[in-house]
Amino acid sequence: MNNPFQNAMHQLERATKVQKFSSEFMSRLAQPEREIRIAIPIVMDDGLLKVFEGYRVQYNSARGPYKGGIRYHQDTEINEVKALAFWMALKCAVANIPMGGGKGGVTVDPRELSKNEIEKLSRGWVRLMAQNIGPKVDVPAPDMNTTPEIMSWMSDEYSKITGDKTNATFTGKPIENGGSEGRGPATGLGGFYVFDILRQKMNLPESCNIVIQGFGNVGGNAANIFYKNGHKIIALSDVEGGILKEDGIDITALNEYRKVNGKIIDFPGSRKISNDELLTLECDVLIPAALESQITEKNAKDIKAKLVMELANGPTTPEADDILFGRNIPVIPDILANAGGVTVSTFEWEQNLKGEHWGEDEVFSKLKVIMETEALGIYEKAKILNTDMRRSAFIIALERIEKATKI
Ligand code: NAD
């Protein structure tokens, strides 16, 4: 079985072969500062007690409080959470925001729980973690299958337990409850800003053919944004499989179709395809926006995209990175491409602490400056070092974390 934490450490090793860092610093980064496991007891709707396993990994705090989402998924386990927490530390450094890296989760298939049970589970997670999180300590956020409503319950529970009224311990809250304007589309939009500033440098046309794996918060918003900016989405998928329409999918109509039918499969005029087929379609840009370890040594040689942009966390294994680099297919790495989410989350935290509420235009223009600046920096550094953008992004992040560690 694929171990995401091993992949993350392998990526670290790959990058530090290009530029060396001290062995003291490397040994600090080889493991998280703290790893917390909890057992959350819930009385289910049928009156029976069930215990769920939960996690928080606090990887590195050299640059600020730990920051990272909480994932609810049946396959979530400690190695996945550790990898995600490590990537968060690097991602916050790439975005140059004053945060460290953390991540949380619960091993649960939320589709099997009622809304009432999910609320109890979420409040239970906070009760057991409350001593280890807080606005100046660790600031969680949503991730896969966790929503603004869940953040609202968590924030409420935290405030009941600790008396803290800043609302700054959880981000990704609904706007009425201290959330930031623009947090919903932030990850997809941040990815678009990165793509748009690098597009010409990569000799890609003004209107690109795009393939997206995943149609949730990140993939769905990315589809809307790329579509509205004149690009053609030729294929899309979700957990049930994919759809292909060579002359382009009308994303507005697809959103309507999903609202009515609760699925994207069988969208009129499209052909059904498997997720495997989707990943190897001929296109300008392939955007994995669902799960880890989707592009591996098994399918990397068959990828026909001219550019891979990772909106999911960890969708490409290190072995696949080597194959794609050898085939001159650039990869915009997750720690840059999807950093828009944590960046706007940090804006939310800042607004909560200052008692401010910024308008959407202000949020987006601040986000754009960060994403474009860091994208250009990583692109140029990769050219100078004659390496791929993942290694260049790692090196920039490591330099920043090392500097903060020394200070
Ligand atoms: P989500 O739960 O909203 O959506 C996930 C999507 O992936 C859904 O459309 C689901 O049907 C699809 N999916 C699940 N299994 C699949 C499979 N086997 N094949 C194809 N599609 C599949 O989650 P999200 O928030 O959009 O997160 C997606 C990825 O982006 C994750 O890797 C997450 O860590 C990362 N990410 C999210 C954010 C954020 O702001 N939400 C920020 C940074 C990174």
Image (cartoon, helix red, strand yellow):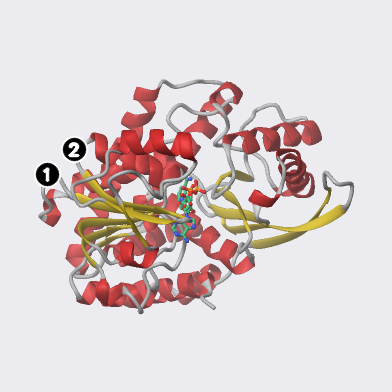
Q: Residue at x 39, y 24 (%)?
A: 360
The image shows residue 32 at horizontal and vertical percentages of 60, 65
Q: Between tags 2 and 1, which lies in front?
A: 2
Q: How many marks?
A: 2
Local packing at callout 1 (Cα closer than 10 Å; few below 14, some 14-19, many 20+) is few
Specify the quadrant of the image occupied by residue 82.
bottom right
Q: Is mark 1 within 8 Å of ligand 1?
A: no
Amino acid type at circle 1 is Glu
Q: Is residue 111 visible?
A: yes
- Asked if residue 169 can be seen in this view, the reply is no
**Residue behind mark 1:** 206
- The residue positioned 53% from the left and 65% from the top of the image is 83
**Nearer the observer, 37 or 350:** 37
Q: Earlier in the sequence, mark 2 or mark 1?
A: 1
Residue closest to the eye, 281 or 387: 281
In the structure shown, which secondary structural element does the residue marked by tag 2 occupy? loop
Residue 154 percent across, percent down from the top left? 69, 38
Q: CA distance from mark 2 to mark 1?
A: 8 Å
Dot 2 amino acid type: Gly
Question: Residue 112: x, y in percent?
Answer: 69, 51
Q: Which residue is mark 2?
A: 230
- Report x, y in % for residue 41: 83, 52
